Image: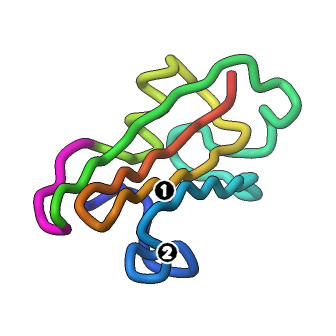
Amino acid sequence: MSGCADLRGPLSPTSVPLLANYTTPYVMTYKAPGGIGMAAQGQAQKAGKACIDNLFGFIAFGDASIDAAKKAGKIKQVAYYETQFVRAAGYYSRFCTHVYGI
């Protein structure tokens, strides 16, 4: 899962109830390759979304990377992003990255 958001931490698949939907916002405070940074803060006019789906805990498909979300939203510079984790009865889960910028 190179380049994908990390599922470990307070919202890991083993720490949420059977039915769950969590969204966590992040503001980028550093410069990184690909134009991520605070320069676009307050000017976010575009949004992009990229997801990865998981069936039965071992069949995964998709791309939830920031780069995939940037491409989907035609974003050149990221102001901030959110992650969303949805789980249904342990059989299906979806992790999405929502990116906002210009």
Does the magenta run of residues contain 17?
no
Nearer to me, 58 or 41: 58
Q: Residues within 10 Å of mark 2 (few under 14, many from 20)?
A: some
Side of 62 where 27 appears, left or right:
right
Q: Position of residue 25 (x, y in %)?
A: 71, 53
Overall secondary structure of the magenta section: strand
Q: Position of residue 93 (x, y in %)?
A: 33, 56
Q: Tag 2's secondary structure?
A: loop
**What span is colored magenta in the figure?**
57-62
> Which residue is found at the position 63% from the left and 48% from the top?
82
Q: Tag 1's secondary structure?
A: strand
> Which residue is found at the position 46% from the left and 61% from the top?
19
Q: Quadrant of the N terminus?
A: bottom left
Q: Position of residue 68 (x, y in %)?
A: 38, 35
Residue with the mark numbered 1:
85
Side of 45 where 70 appears, left or right:
left
Question: Marks 1 and 2: CB-CB under 8 Å?
Answer: yes
On residue 99, the disc is none
Does the magenta run of residues contain 60?
yes
> Up-down: is 11 above or below 76?
below
First in sequence: mark 1 vs mark 2: 2
- Report the residue that reaches farthest toward the right: 42
Residue with the mark numbered 2:
16
Q: Amino acid at mark 1?
A: Phe
> Which residue is found at the position 51% from the left and 47% from the top?
33
Q: Residues within 10 Å of mark 1 (few under 14, many from 20)?
A: many
Location of residue 79 by image quarter: top right
> Which residue is found at the position 36% from the left and 51% from the top?
94
